[in-house]
Amino acid sequence: MNKGKKKQEQPATDVSIYIAALSVNFRPAANPAETTHWFSTDEVLAAIRDIDPSAKISREQVFSALRNAGYDFCNRPGSHGLLLRWMFREKN
């Protein structure tokens, strides 16, 4: 190993803090009829990067974090094509 050329790896950003922030205003929707907001994985990732441009987060991390938090995704009712979006229910 060449210590002089060894890259310093940036630690991955903890995605759970951003999912917790989402959960302040939203909860997982149980089905499409209950859904108030539809977001793609890229939209959630873009929102995280808007908040923290230095966040080292991948689409896969966002996907896994949302699934682990209980969020599910499907095609919007009445839409044509295959565009899956996460189902969010706004908290009152």
Image (cartoon, grey):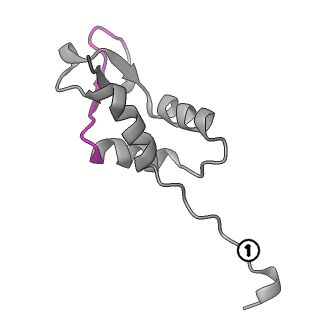
Q: Residue furthest bottom?
A: 1
For the N terminus, give its image quadrant: bottom right
For the C terminus, give its image quadrant: top left
Answer above or below: position of 56 versus 31. below
Q: Position of residue 76 (x, y in %)?
A: 31, 16
Q: Nearer the viewer, residue 21 or 76?
A: 21
Left or right of 24: which side holds 42? right
Tell me the residue at 35%/31% (across/down).
24
Tell me the residue at 45%/50% (across/down).
61
Q: Residues within 10 Å of mark 1 (few under 14, many from 20)?
A: few
Q: Position of residue 67 (x, y in %)?
A: 30, 43
Tell me the residue at 82%/85% (across/down).
4
Quadrant of the image occupied by residue 74: top left
Residue type at mark 1 is Lys
Q: Which residue is mark 1?
A: 7
Q: Residue furthest right?
A: 4
Q: Position of residue 53 (x, y in %)?
A: 66, 41
Left or right of 36: which side holds 31? left
Q: Nearer the viewer, residue 78 or 4?
A: 4
Answer above or below: position of 66 versus 85. below
Tell me the residue at 55%/59% (across/down).
12
Quadrant of the image occupied by residue 34: top left
Start and end of the magenta stretch? Answer: 68-80
Q: Position of residue 84 (x, y in %)?
A: 36, 27
Q: Say if residue 61 shows up in the picture.
A: yes
How many labels were placed on the picture? 1
Is the stretch drawn in magenta largely helix, strand or loop? loop
